[in-house]
Amino acid sequence: MPLFTYKVKDKKGEILEDVVQAADKKEIAASLKSENYQILSIRKLDAKKSPFLRGSVSISDKAAFCRFLATMLRAGLPLPEALDIIRQETQNKKLQNILFDLSFHVRKGENLSSVLAKYKGDFDTVFLTMVKAGEESGTLDQSFDYLSKQLLASYELVQKVKGSLMYPAVIVVAMVGNAVIMLVFVLPKLSQVFLQLNVKLPVTTRFILNVGNSISQNMTLTLVIFFSILAFAVSVFLIKKTREAIFGVFVKLPVINKLMSQIDVARFARTLSTLLKSGVPIMIALDVSSDVISQPKLKKQSKEFSHGIATGKSLSDILTEGKRIFPVTMVQTIRAGEKTGSLETVLEEMSQFYEMEVDYSLKRATALLEPVLMLFIGVAVGAMVVMMITPIYSIVGGLGSGL
């Protein structure tokens, strides 16, 4: 739908101005008149130039939105009024515009889920499915309550992973920075001194000094090559296919593979539990839950779950067939949940268990990585020192012999 900006005057004489999506100006005018606004102007905007669609809505912003909306709906506040209140409180400009658009169309009688579907870049399939299920079952407040917990759990999991990777990332950046400083500033100065002296140098030392000398003589070319390599590396990760190929190789490493499996299992179990609690049919819930899995093998197998359910099989039986990609503990727990009729509760407990396992695995991996990185840095610095000190001893020895 096209974007329009309008300016109106309310009953108190205050001038209000905002942006909304609508089919045409007549639709906006009719809606504003029904709210007793005096229309001053309605103007169509260029969607590409408008800030309405710029920016993004973070997980924390969405979690706060869901929590506040669930509380207000539970208190009996009308949906449009609740959306307007949250819009006034939020600091995210894009979310403000989205909330106004939601309020505008909900007042006209449209479903919240159908309006949210226009913003699939900010609200994923899980979010839209749960909102639609809440509308159909009349439990929209519960759906948003479950969504807030789901988003908060996802946010905490992402922050744990980022926090664990922060230390290794800082060490790697420091190593690269140290190498650049040595190559660009230190080695060129040393090479000018050492290579002019009539002293026999080790092969490795002479090679490094020649590299430093070449860099000093071709500084512009060196910087162009360096930034070209950096730009190429960044572009490789921006391209989806190459990023997936690198990810596919990376996750095959034993420690990383186990960690990624735990993350996927935790996200799958929590998403499926949340959808089932919201009243989503299990076949639809399984299809939607499979989209949160990142590993290709795991995702491919989970996509076939709904077909198995359609043939009359239980989820635990489907999980035991074929390759055991999902953990045996999870399968046994799901079987117990199916027998007792508490599948969604069991899945939530399993998600909490595997989220704790992810936390422990990250701590163990970080604890193992720290000494390895320190050892690598020590070896690299030691080798550099030896290669620089050896010719100095040779020079001192040569001067002593001359004296």
Image: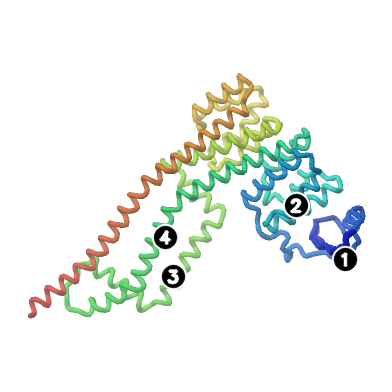
In the image, which disc is placed on residue 173? 4
Question: Residue type at mark 4?
Answer: Val
- The image shows residue 347 at horizontal and vertical percentages of 58, 30
Say few, some or many: other residues with alpha carbon within 10 Å of mark 2 (under 14 / 14 to 19 / 20 or more).
many
Amino acid carrying label 1: it is: Ser
Q: Is residue 320 visible?
A: no
- The mark that comes first in sequence, 2 or 4, is 2
Towards the viewer: 224 or 334: 334
Q: Which residue lies furthest to the front in this view?
A: 12
Please state the total of marks drawn on the protein image.
Answer: 4
Q: How far apart are marks 4 and 3 (CA)?
A: 19 Å
Q: Which mark is residue 99?
A: 2
Neighbourhood count class around disc 1 (C-alpha, 10 Å): few under 14, some 14–19, many 20 upward:
few
Rendering coords of residue 134 (x, y %): 74, 36
Nearest to the eye among marks 4 and 3: give it. Answer: 4
Element type at mark 1: strand
Residue at the disc numbered 1:
41
Query: How far apart are the alpha carbons under marks 3 and 2?
Result: 47 Å
Between the C-alphas of marks 2 and 4, the distance is: 40 Å
Q: In this view, does 269 lie to the left or right of 400?
A: right
Q: Do we see residue 272 in this rendering?
A: yes
Q: Residue 94 lies in what quarter of the image?
A: bottom right
